[in-house]
């Protein structure tokens, strides 16, 4: 009976690894309010967004290309292509570091004004200029 335990644990670990890999390959849905920008974390919560000083909200979430949460302190100095949203007070709230496939989806608005003029397809995760 005890001989089967290590094999069962190994099999369960293998299944979790395969499931985790499959989940990481799925497309992430971005909200229609997400804008594209270049983010550099300077001294958390201070950031540069598109070259201008900005600030992360107290509850900001940064998701890496693997969709796992990243700590802002671990990203200091890196220039990252991201999608981001703002909270009502104007602070940067949700940030997604883009994969090469996500970065290739163009066009994507970089300002709220562009987002107002363009049309978003949530199913296809694409923007169309009107």
Image (tube, rainbow, N blue to C red):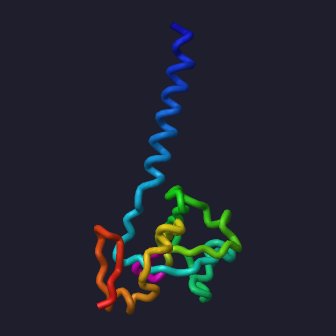
Give the residue drawn at x 48%, y 67%: 101
- Look at the image and give the residue range highlighted in magenta: 83-91
Whether residue 16 is visible to the viewer of this picture, yes or no, is yes
Q: Is residue 50 above or below residue 59?
A: below
Taking the image as shown, residue 24 lies to the left or right of residue 114, namely: right
Residue closest to the eye, 45 or 115: 115
Residue 60 seen in this snapshot? no
Farthest right residue in view: 77
Q: What is the x, y in percent for residue 31?
A: 36, 71
Q: Magenta stretch containing residue 86, yes or no?
A: yes
Residue 76 percent across, percent down from the top left: 69, 70
Q: Is residue 112 magenta?
A: no
Residue at 68%, 74% in the rendered image: 43
Of residues 18 and 92, which is closer to you in this image?
18
Outermost residue to the top: 1
For the point 55% across and 62% down, the residue is 64
Q: Quadrant of residue 126?
A: bottom left
Task: Locate the C terminus and report the quarter of the image it occupies.
Answer: bottom left
Q: Residue at x 38, y 92 (%)?
A: 113
Q: How many marks?
A: 0
Residue 60 position within the rendered picture, expressed as x and y whole percent measured from the top left: 51, 68
User: As drawn, is 78 to the left or to the right of 90?
Assistant: right
Residue 75, position as x, y percentages in the image? 66, 67
């Amino acid at each position: 009976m005890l001989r089967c335990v290590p094999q069962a644990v190994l099999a369960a670990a293998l299944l979790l690894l395969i499931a985790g890999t499959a989940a990481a390959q799925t497309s992430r849905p971005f909200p229609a309010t997400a804008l594209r920008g270049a983010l550099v974390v300077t001294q958390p919560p201070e950031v540069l967004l598109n070259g201008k000083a900005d600030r992360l909200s107290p509850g900001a979430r940064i998701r890496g290309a693997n969709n796992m949460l990243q700590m802002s302190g671990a990203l200091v100095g890196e220039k990252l292509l991201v999608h981001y949203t703002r909270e009502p007070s104007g602070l940067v709230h949700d940030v997604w570091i883009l994969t090469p496939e996500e970065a290739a989806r163009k066009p994507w608005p970089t300002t709220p004004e562009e987002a107002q003029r363009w049309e978003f397809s949530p199913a296809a995760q694409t923007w169309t200029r009107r």
